[in-house]
Image (cartoon, grey):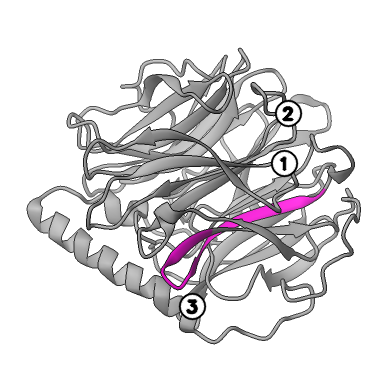
Amino acid sequence: MPGSTHFRTRLRSPAAIVALALALAVLVALGVALQLHRAEPPRPGHAGAQPPKPGTRGTQSVRDTAPAPLRDGSALYPRAIRLQHSGSANGRVLVATVVHHGEDGVGAVQESTDGGARFHSVGSATAPQSAAGRGLCCATLYELPQRIGELPAGTLLWAASFGLTEHDRRMTIRVFKSTDLGRKWSRLSTVAAASDTRGLWEPEFSVDREGNLVCHYSDETDPRHSQKLVAARSPDGVTWHDRRDTVAGTPGSDRPGMAVVRKLPDGTYVMAYEICAAAGRFSCVVHYRTSSDGWDWGDPAYLGIRPETADGKYFKHAPNLAWAPEAGNPRGELLLIGQVMYDRDGTRAKGSGRTVWTNSKGGAGPWRETRAPLAVTSGKVDFCPNYSSSLLPSPDARRVLEVATDYHKGVCRAYYATSGR
């Protein structure tokens, strides 16, 4: 995927820049080629299945499902949410992915009204800035939990990185809104615009304690840092201000990125992210940190905590985080996934690509391993296999829906499955 962390974190020298440009050119061509690949015929429960009738109310019913393709053709960077602030539609599951129609980048939205057993297409977010090969990357999907300015609770937000080509590159992070459950999308605002040809990546939304909409993103435009994590906030989703660094490492060659933020019932905010650095055992290892208000994350130079299991396993690359209720625990349970899992000695762990971690103490202490609903079998470490997979626990926390990407006949496809815990 153009702009993927695996192609951005090694930006160290002119030779590396040339290599990056060539890689991006190949990937843009790949994006076109993916659409020419013959799609598989629809399978039961697959996106090609007959969608439910319009107006069907979302349901909280969740059951185990076998792995199935989310949609025909390629799909990248999945984001799954369950509606909780949308009235009679509460319980519906929406999944957004980045797809390419020819040279146009599109944010595709799929919906399930049966708890994630079947999905069908409902809408797409498009913009001229991602058309004609201009590039689209690493989008996010978010349901407003409360009113923000004139935006009522339940408004859907979709944001992505636009303009990642190597020619005339001026990247922006743009936000779109939907007030009809993802059917139609309209442009809302621009969070950030690059002043040079360096990157702005991986937007992530949250609402801070004061009720401001916060957008976290990865920023390459500061000459003092190869990359850093930045947050901006908005009282209305339209105007953005108060930009601040959340993670900006020392030395400046460190590359924190790919922030994911979840709020716990006690008001604590938890952020998971990767920190890529010079080659070594812990390059691109997953970290986390916490905030009491969702805005102040402490000293940006503090790199955070590396989550580990009791026997020293750790994740590298592209983390994602989810929250689930837990009986007898008012803080609930955190679920964490990363692209690759390693043993203490730095070798790839046996359960890599098929393991989710859980923690009942807000991230503190050792994490526990549990079987993931999907088994990602490709051994490649690039923009596709298990790259920022999305986890969505059921309302009763007994099951987890996972949406993950993997290669099939050379095409990066999104798959989904639900399994009990």
Tell me where the magenta segment starts and ends, as one range.
92-106
Q: Secondary structure at mark 3?
A: helix
Q: Which mark is residue 35?
A: 3
**Residue under pointer 1:** 179
Q: Is residue 99 above or below residue 147?
A: below
In-image side of 19 versus 395 (left or right): left
* Screen quadrant of the N terminus: bottom left
Q: Secondary structure at mark 1?
A: loop
Q: Which mark is residue 152?
A: 2
Residue at screen point 21% across, 66% down: 22
Residue at screen point 42% across, 47% down: 161
- The amino acid type found where label 3 is placed reads Gln
- The amino acid type found where label 2 is placed reads Pro
Q: Nearer the viewer, residue 333 or 413?
A: 413
Q: Residue furthest top?
A: 210
- Estimate how packed mark 2 is, as few (under 14), some (14 to 19) or many (20 or more) residues with alpha carbons within 10 Å: some
